[in-house]
Amino acid sequence: MEGAPPKSRPTRVLVADDTDSIRALFEKLLASDGYQVTSVVDGLQALEAAHSIRPDVVLLDVGMPGLDGIEVCRRLKSDPTMRLTPVVLVTGLSDLADRIRGIEAGADDFLTKPVHPHELRARVASLSRMKHLTDALDSAESAFMALALTIEARDPTTRGHCERLAKWAVQLGRALGLAADDLDALHRGGYLHDVGKIGVPDAVLLKPGPLTAQEFEQMKRHTEIGDTLCAPLQSLRDVRPIVLSHHEKLDGSGYPQGLRGDAVPVLAQIVGVVDVYDALTSDRPYRLALEPETAARHLVEDVERGRFSKLHVEAFLDSLRLTSAGVHLEVRVPS
């Protein structure tokens, strides 16, 4: 049998075609393989059904009247909640222009009319496996996000820390002109940077005063613990350098590896800057929050000591001037 692999629920397939005979054929073939098939007759119905049933695979006829399959594909792929759903466009044998437009719209695969039954079943089986694997990775990453927020909740003085770091890191990344993939890694890294603190005892993590040398060594291990936790997930490969290296400094004074200069990953440098700023402007058991301008001066001093990049700190302070209501920072980074 060429159908879907065993799983907890049937694979949902959405078929959109204005030809009754083709819809009936697809429904019969796919239903016999155990798929849950929903069929519609035009593009508008396809969009409505996609958002209603959340299909695992979408089959779209390119030549539907009104909203054609390529436009439906484009709209689905532009929706963050649907962009990982595989879309197959069904085209005529000689419709090269449609295939090119389909690729530009984000189509994952093509079927050529007349569609061979074995090819249809094989393509849907392959794409449904891919979708279920993607969903499993997404679920695992969501669990990591929940774990990070749970760790944050252990310490009431750090409430909102992860959310602020994610926001500020992306804000700084945009100011530096980073690519969309890097911005995504910064957003997730902001939440996950301290996930390794799950391995730090409460007596150390919540201590209301300075740590002893031995306690600080325990605290520093959270970077390596976090990296080890994230390692099995391929989807977190771009986030791991942030988790491992956000406490590294350009002068080699950071941890866990004592990296210097360009050896410190850029995304980790960015999260490191905003992490220090948020720590300084938040209440701690051993001190009250500093004023934004005072915290900014600390960052400037770290630039002067060679710990942070002048470019990063200056861009971050400039972004705060533009986006933070009530914050008027006049601190400048020396040239």
Image (cartoon, rainbow, N blue to C red):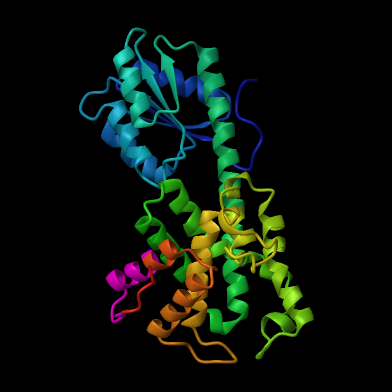
Quarter assignment of residue 229: bottom right
Please tell me which residue lies in front, 184 or 299: 299
Q: Which residue range is magenta in the image?
A: 315-328
Q: Is residue 19 visible?
A: no
Q: Is residue 145 magenta?
A: no
Q: Nearer the viewer, residue 51 or 86?
A: 86
Q: Position of residue 68 (x, y in %)?
A: 26, 26
Quadrant in which the C terminus appears = bottom left
Q: Is residue 68 left or right of residue 213?
A: left
The residue positioned 38% from the left and 19% from the top of the image is 90
Tell me which corner region of the image, top left, top right, bottom left or bottom right, holds residue 242. bottom right
**Residue 242 located left or right of residue 47:** right
In the rendering, at what x and y percent does residue 285 appear? 59, 90
Dominant secondary-structure state across the stretch colored magenta: helix
At x 37% / y 71%, what residue is drawn? 317
Q: Is residue 212 left or right of residue 108?
A: right
**Relative image position of residue 239 (x, y in whole percent):** 57, 53
Whether residue 14 is visible here, answered yes or no, is yes
320 w.r.t. 292: above or below: above
Seen at 37% across and 44% down, the residue is 51
- Whether the magenta-drawn stretch holds residue 316 is answered as yes
Look at the picture and state if 105 lies above or below 80: above
Instruction: Residue at 48%, 77% (x, y): give it.
Output: 301
In the depicted view, which residue is nearer to us: 85 or 218? 218
Q: Quadrant of residue 133?
A: top right
Outermost residue on the right side: it is 214
Q: Nearer the viewer, residue 129 or 10?
A: 129
